[in-house]
Image (tube, rainbow, N blue to C red):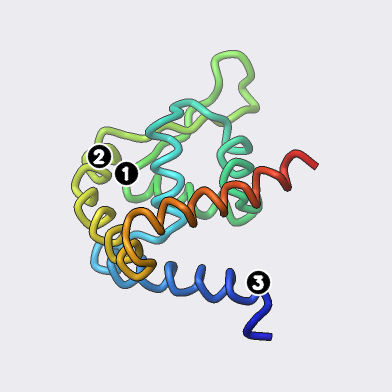
């Protein structure tokens, strides 16, 4: 089993996830929270369903994530100007400040993972290979 590619990918994902949790636990930030804030920072006004789909998060789980970000004042829902049934998501000023504040922690986390892989070149190679895996899946 330990030689199966899927098993190794899952174990690697768990190791990265654990490192992230340890790095951000003092800030009360989970990987999903960080991912949502990052997407909203780059794409303000996306519908909830679009953000959830982009991140591969089930809708039921996603609502709870956004609820938590709203309670912390980091993100907000707004009704669409064109369709009142649609909720658009935006990062708040506090959310932008929060992302700026944690940027050094994000960099340290990325540097640690890169070092464990053997450096930036190895990290970039792995990143390219992983991208190829899920982009080819999306094209099927």
Q: Is residue 17 above or below residue 105?
A: below
Q: Which picture quadrant has residue 140? A: top right
Residue to which mark 3 is pinned: 5
Q: Which mark is residue 45?
A: none
- Ranked by sequence position, the earlier of labels 2 and 1 is 1
* Disc 2: CA contacts within 10 A as few (<14), some (14-19) or many (>=20): few
Mark 1 nearby-residue class (10 Å; few <14, some 14–19, many ≥20)? some
Question: Which residue is labeled 2 in the image?
Answer: 94
Element type at mark 3: helix
Gap between marks 2 and 1 measured at Cα: 6 Å
**Between discs 1 and 3, the one toward the N terminus:** 3
Q: Residue at x 27, y 37 (%)?
A: 96
Q: What mark, if any, has residue 73 been given in the picture?
A: 1
Q: Nearer the viewer, residue 17 or 88?
A: 17
Mark closer to the observer (1, 3): 3
Q: Position of residue 95 (x, y in %)?
A: 30, 41
Q: Which SS class for mark 1?
A: loop
- Nearer to me, 91 or 35: 35
Q: CA distance from mark 1 to mark 3?
A: 40 Å
**Which quarter shows the N terminus?**
bottom right
- Residue 60 appears left or right of 122: right
Examine the rendered structure and indicate whether residue 117 appears above or below residue 84. below
Pointers 3 and 2 in contact (C-beta within 8 Å): no
Viewer-nearest of labels 2 and 1?
2
Q: Is residue 32 left or right of residue 60?
A: left
Query: In the image, residue 46 lies at what x, y percent?
Result: 53, 29
In the depicted structure, whether residue 15 falls above or below residue 93: below
Instruction: Looking at this view, name the residue that lies furthest to the top.
Output: 82
| Crowd rating for badge 3 (residues with CA inside 10 Å; few <14, some 14–19, many 20+) | few
């Amino acid at each position: 089993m330990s030689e199966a590619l899927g098993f190794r990918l899952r174990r690697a994902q768990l190791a990265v996830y654990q490192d992230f949790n340890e790095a951000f636990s003092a800030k009360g930030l989970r990987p999903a929270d960080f991912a949502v804030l990052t997407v909203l920072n780059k794409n303000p006004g996306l519908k909830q369903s679009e953000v959830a789909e982009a991140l591969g998060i089930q809708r039921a789980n996603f609502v709870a994530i956004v609820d938590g970000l709203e309670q912390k004042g980091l993100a907000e829902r707004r009704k669409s100007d064109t369709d009142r049934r649609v909720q658009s998501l935006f990062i708040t000023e506090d959310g932008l400040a929060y992302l700026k504040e944690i940027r050094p922690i994000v960099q340290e986390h990325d540097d640690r993972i890169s070092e464990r892989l053997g450096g930036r070149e190895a990290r970039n190679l792995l990143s390219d290979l992983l991208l190829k895996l899920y982009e080819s899946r999306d094209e099927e």
